Image (cartoon, rainbow, N blue to C red):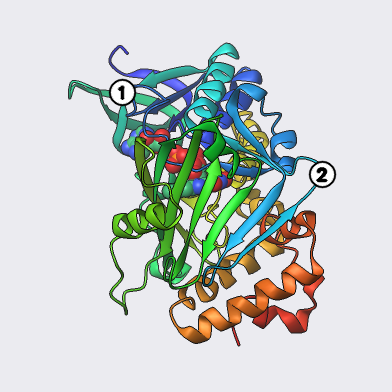
Amino acid sequence: MSDQQTFEVLIAGAGPAGLLLARRLAQAGVCVAVVDPLLDLHQAAFSSAALPLSAVKEFQLPAQVQAARWHGWQLHGPGDQQRQWMADHDLGAVLDFGGLRQWLADQATAAGAHLQLGWAVRGWCSAASGAIANLRGPGGQERSVACRWLVDATGQRRALLGDPPAESGALVAGSGVEWLLQLPLPQWNQWSERLSFMLGRAWVPQGYGWVFPMQPGQLKLGVCRLHDASRRQPPLHQLLSQLQLRLHLADAPVLDRHGGLIRSTIRRREPHQRGPLLGLGDAVSTGNLLGGEGIRHAMASSEVLAPLLLQALGGRPDALRRYPLQLRRRLGWRWSLSGRLARRTWLGLNSSAGDQRLERLLEGLQQKSSAEELSALLFHYRFERYGWKALPYLLGWR
Ligand SMILES: Cc1cc2nc3c(=O)[nH]c(=O)nc-3n(C[C@H](O)[C@H](O)[C@H](O)COP(=O)(O)OP(=O)(O)OC[C@H]3O[C@@H](n4cnc5c(N)ncnc54)[C@H](O)[C@@H]3O)c2cc1C
């Protein structure tokens, strides 16, 4: 990068949101650059990256980024019980998150976007023609870049927008830790083709554990938990080691250890724009805490922002005022409801009463629901199928 380069749009963050936006803008002929401190997009692949099939189709994700397909659910808990729901067709995929980022980056650069790996945006200021961003490179060198619009796509870190103001409501946070395990095929087969979750306070208090299949011979084993300042919570690594022992996975070599945070406001009323700075993806709370997932929601935010940003670049900056509302509509009322319910659902799993509620819920699901219906509940938030009266029970309110 030479001193004071100029782009129409500069995107901070080469996650799914930033890279998809770069691709959409470059395809429309915009001079756009993406910067990210990662030197290699396969590094720090922190996300479990499970998606429903609808998202795989909607974003046309190719086979090369799908590590495994799944067509069922396996739920362990609250004690040693184990329940299974299997469909006769695929319901979703577990992605190779690093592979997804690399594929999106290849698509964006093929369309003409500039990708600057090893560079982080350290700060920015408004300028007559937009913004000036200050970048730091891999060797600590500093550069500045001028742009008409600057996009904060730095995920839950919100490196440029900062945390939302108090009036937008508190950020609800969950931490996840995940290990990539290598194991013999006969053992891997027991966990393949399904998403497995471990629920209940004897497994993971105020959260859940999971085993997701990757390519043959590899599994992701993880735990995620919502933060609760009023309670001492055991370290996540300790819970993960216990899970490994209890699931007879202790002999499997660990190929990679990673993890991270999901942080979202519940109502998503935070500012999405500050002058020439726009927020995208998890930086504006698209991560969903109920399912601990947000790749498809982050990519949806790029789909919403791209046409509005094109209008702004074409001389109609007012178009961007519609962004927060259009994004809320795209995510839908079910998304908001699930966000609100996440806190109660997970934080409530800390007592025998919580385990009993969970037991009743799982029993009911086993009797009444198919694998497809479980997907509709957990990925499409179709709570009403269980009747509005059942909702408080379903989500642990009573
Ligand atoms: C443990 C865990 C498990 C998860 N499992 C799932 C799952 O199964 N399914 C699912 O859909 N979602 C899952 N998620 C959530 C999902 O990964 C996120 O919602 C999604 O990655 C958000 O995309 P994004 O592009 O908004 O941000 P991110 O993917 O977080 O990308 C942000 C990028 O910004 C870069 N960056 C940071 N600071 C700067 C800076 N100053 N300048 C420039 N760049 C910067 C980072 O290096 C990063 O590459 C999980 C998350 C965690 C933590």
Identify the residue at image location x=72%, y=62%.
377
Identify the residue at image location x=31%, y=74%.
229
Disc 1 to disc 2, how far (Cα)?
44 Å
Q: Which residue is mark 2?
A: 88
249 or 33, which lies in front? 249
Q: Is mark 2 within 8 Å of ligand 1?
A: no
Identify the residue at image location x=36%, y=55%.
240
206 or 287, which lies in front? 206
Where in the figure is residue 19, as x and y percent of width and height?
53, 29
Q: Quadrant of residue 381?
A: bottom right
Is residue 62 shown above or below 393? above
Is residue 11 shown above or below 322? above
Asked whether, in this view, residue 182 is left or right of residue 317, the answer is left
146 or 39, which lies in front? 39
Quadrant housing the C terminus: bottom right
Q: Quadrant of residue 23?
A: top right
Asked whether, in this view, residue 198 is left or right of residue 370, the answer is left
Q: Quadrant of residue 121?
A: top left
**Residue type indicated by callout 2:** Asp
Q: Which residue is mark 1?
A: 118
Q: Quadrant of ligand 1?
A: top left
**Residue type indicated by callout 1:** Gly
Identify the residue at image location x=42%, y=25%.
41
130 or 283, which lies in front? 283
Q: Which of the labelled discs sits on residue 25, or is there none? A: none
Is residue 261 shown above or below 132? below
Where in the figure is residue 354, as x and y percent of width and height?
52, 81
